[in-house]
Image (cartoon, helix red, strand yellow):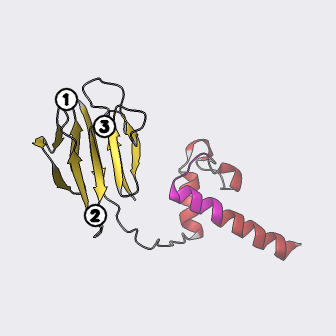
Amino acid sequence: MAMLRMKLNNALFPVSGTRTVIGRSMEADVVVDIVQDISRQHCAICLNDDGSYLLEDFGSHNGTFINDTQISGEIDLNNGDVLRVGKYIEFVFMASVPKAAPRRVTPTDSDIADYLRSRGPSRGRTPSIATIDASDDSPTAQQAMSEFASAARKSMRRDG
């Protein structure tokens, strides 16, 4: 699915269906009511049958721009284009990109121990599951927690 990222605050808006309307009206799909220079229904992003996108200006008084060029009517929209509605509000268009298959990288015990020793107050101590920062959602930390949980389960089966 394609997305719009508002440059002002990095808010993300999905571009879904065959038409996503941007405007000040509460009926718009992307409501931008923080400035008055945007029309109630200012413009729309449309999905073509071939999977490409286009931007359609609805004849707005303050204009619709792609990469600082004012448009009228319809124009192709490409990944990374900067869309400006009115004088101030800018979005970056992010076309959907197929995700590559995730790679599973299994760290060695030494990698996990090195990672855990490098974390805050646990530096230099023998690593244990308690030394992993549970709020750390980085792939390395999540992998370390998964590996330790797996090792603990194996150890419990072996010792039990």
**Disc 3 + disc 2, Cβ < 8 Å:** no
Q: Residues within 10 Å of mark 1 (few under 14, many from 20)?
A: some
Residue annotated with mark 3:
41
What type is the residue that disc 2 sits on?
A: Asn
Q: Is residue 150 above or below residue 123?
A: below
Residue displayed at 36% across by 34% down: 9
**Which residues fall within the magenta stretch?**
135-146
* Sequence-first disc among 1 and 2: 2
- The span from disc 3 to disc 2 (Cα, nearest Å) is 20 Å
Answer with left or right where residue 58 lies relative to residue 147.
left
**For residue 116, what is the image quadrant?**
bottom right
- The span from disc 3 to disc 1 (Cα, nearest Å) is 15 Å
Residue annotated with mark 1:
87
Residue displayed at 36% across by 51% down: 3
Queried whether the magenta region covers residue 138, the answer comes back as yes
Residue annotated with mark 2:
48
Answer with left or right where residue 66 lies relative to residue 41.
left
What type is the residue that disc 1 sits on?
A: Lys
Tell me the tag on residue 129: none
Q: Is residue 96 above or below residue 60?
A: below
Q: Tell me residue 7's x, y (percent).
A: 30, 38
